[in-house]
Each structure stands twice: as structure tokens, then as C-alpha cells.
Image (cartoon, helix red, strand yellow):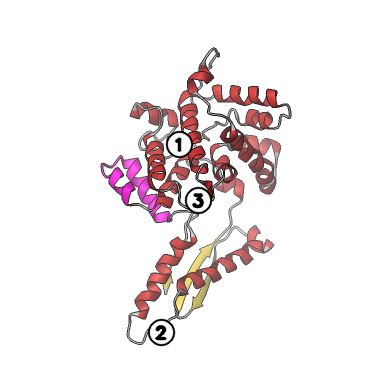
Amino acid sequence: MTDVLPQPDCSLAAVCEPLERCCLDRLEEPGGKRPANTGARLWGRVRSKLLRQKLDPQTVETKNWQTDVIEMNGIKVEFSMKFTSRDMSLKRTPSKKQTGVFGVKISVVTKRERSKVPYIVRQCVEEVEKRGIEEVGIYRISGVATDIQALKAVFDANNKDILLMLSDMDINAIAGTLKLYFRELPEPLLTDRLYPAFMEGIALSDPAAKENCMMHLLRSLPDPNLITFLFLLEHLKRVAEKEPINKMSLHNLATVFGPTLLRPSEVESKAHLTSAADIWSHDVMAQVQVLLYYLQHPPISFAELKRNTLYFSTDV
């Protein structure tokens, strides 16, 4: 029997690969006649089973792990599953961690590195622009979970082999590592404090009022957050310039990154909505629209934003 443990961000290819490798190994055995693509077809059955379970109200309500086995052409996949509500799965856990980069305040990382933008962000962006900017579905297609975790460990350890590892790694894993970094920040890049104001600003109907509000909100961000956001913004614009090749429009990129960079705090969510489904439908579209607004905006200069403005620094 083949044991496969899918990770939360695991792609279809990541799971099919070990299954297919197992099938190929068996084919090399005397008398092996297993059909090709057994791994992909088997995992397709697993996904169908998971979907049926997810749609079953009784399954969703239970808090216990459920085990199932699916067999095809002599290969068995045993998997366990339980469902966690979206508000819990998106919950950011406050961290006092001061070493590494994942889960550490961005102000702590930039101060330690004596940089304006975290090293991990700069290196991942550089690698994507070097050899992944024309990759179809870049940032939308998940990388292999084990590769992403390996890169996370290397960046956290500040290993001297980071650059070599990046050059050899699948580009979707590098893109996934960048997304994971922002997702694991103790608070979103655009901060918990300003979240309600971003939601109000993007809803304004008057273009001039919206412009003033959205620029003021950027000026209100702590410097490390603002500089990193502007750096990422210009990178995503360059990715979107290759849309005819990579199929990633500004809207597609905003859909991928919006809910990661801008998300309500746990307190904010509980104060306004009680249903996890309501939280998702109410907020996600607005989060996407906020990022899309800045992506569609003419280039934004840090120096221009700060010129002749009062800036109140806040701890991140």
C-alpha cells in the first residue's frame, strides 16, 4: 500500500508524482502490466471522494478524523481527513519568534538584515523574474509542498546555499514560498489596524475621494510594510505585462495576493459577522479590489508619498 499525506497547499502534481513513481516501479517488476497514468487517475478518485465528503453536511459538522481507502490497479491510497472552518484555517497566530523570517514581524526582519525589503522577498522576486515570469499560471499554480517547506527551512536558517537551491528549484515552489512568507506574517502586510479603513476606502464612489483615501492609507503604513508592498506591487505589474504568455492578468494576481496581504483580524471578523462563509464572501472581493486598485494605479513612489505629509509611525 502507498501512503500519501497531502499538505494544505499541495498541488495535484505533488501527490500524483509519488503515486506515478510507485506505479512505474511496479511496472518494472516481472509481469508488471499496470496502465500508465494510474497515479493521476487514482488521485482523481481521491479528490472526487473528498469533494463528496465535503458536500455532506454530516461530514462537515463532525470534528473527528475520518479514514478512507481507495484502490486502483493494485495501488491503495489511505487518507484521513477532517474539516476546519475557513475562519480558523486563515487565523494568524501571534508569534514572539525573533529568529528566522517566517512568522516574524517584518520590522524585526528588515532591522536585523539592515535592509528595506526582506531578503526572502527580494530573492524570490528576482528568481521569478529571471526564469518564471513567462510561466503559465505563475503564482496561481501551487508548487510541491515539500519543496516549499525545504525553501522555508533554508531561509529560516539563513543557509549559505540559498542561492544555489533557488537556482535548482521549480519556479512554482519559489512562487509558493513567497506567498507562504506573506501568509505567515504575524499580521497582514497592510496591517490589522488599517483593515477597516481599506474596506471603507475601496467602497467610495467618488474617484477623487477614493484616490485621496487610498494614498493616505499607504502613507499610514509602517515604512517596512510600505516599501515591501510597493516593491511587490511593481513586481506583480511586470508579471502582468506578460499576460499573453503567462495568462496572469492584474485581476488574477490580485485574486491570488489580495486575501494574503489584506485580511481582517480575528477581533474584526467576530465583531461584524458570525458565519465563516459570510466572512469569506463579504471580505474577499473587497480585498481583491483593494490590491487591484493599486495594481492599476500609475507607479507609486515612496518618496512622493512621504513628501509634505505627516507620518505617524506605528509598531508592526
Q: In the displayed image of the protein, which residue is found farthest to the bottom?
A: 31
In magenta, the rendered stretch is: 144-168
Name the amino acid, label 3. Answer: Ile
Mark 2 lies on residue: 33
Q: Is residue 287 left or right of residue 7?
A: right
The answer, for residue 172, to whether it is visible in the render is yes
- Which of disc 2 and disc 3 is earlier in sequence? 2
In the figure, is residue 249 to the left or right of 112?
right
Residue at 50% over, 51% down: 245
Query: Can residue 220 be spotted in the picture?
Result: no
Residue 255 coordinates in the image, percent (x, y): 59, 44
Q: Are marks 2 and 1 in contact (CB under 8 Å)?
A: no
Mark 3 vs mark 2: give the one in front: 3
Q: Nearer the viewer, mark 2 or mark 1?
A: 2
Up-down: is 28 above or below 104?
below
Q: Residue furthest left?
A: 160
Amino acid at dot 2 = Lys
Main SS of the magenta segment?
Answer: helix
Q: Is residue 240 above or below residue 77?
A: above
- Quadrant placement of the N terminus: bottom left
From the image, state whether disc 3 or disc 1 is nearer to you.
3
Element carrying mark 3? helix
State the mark number for residue 82. none
Q: Amino acid at mark 1?
A: Ser
Earlier-in-chain disc, 3 versus 1: 1
Residue beneath the point at 57% across and 31% down: 192
| Residue 21 spot, x, y in % from top left | 38, 70
On the image, numbered disc 3 is attached to which residue?
A: 245
Residue holding disc 1: 95
Residue 306 in the image, given as x and y percentages of width and height: 51, 17
Tag 2, which secondary structure? loop
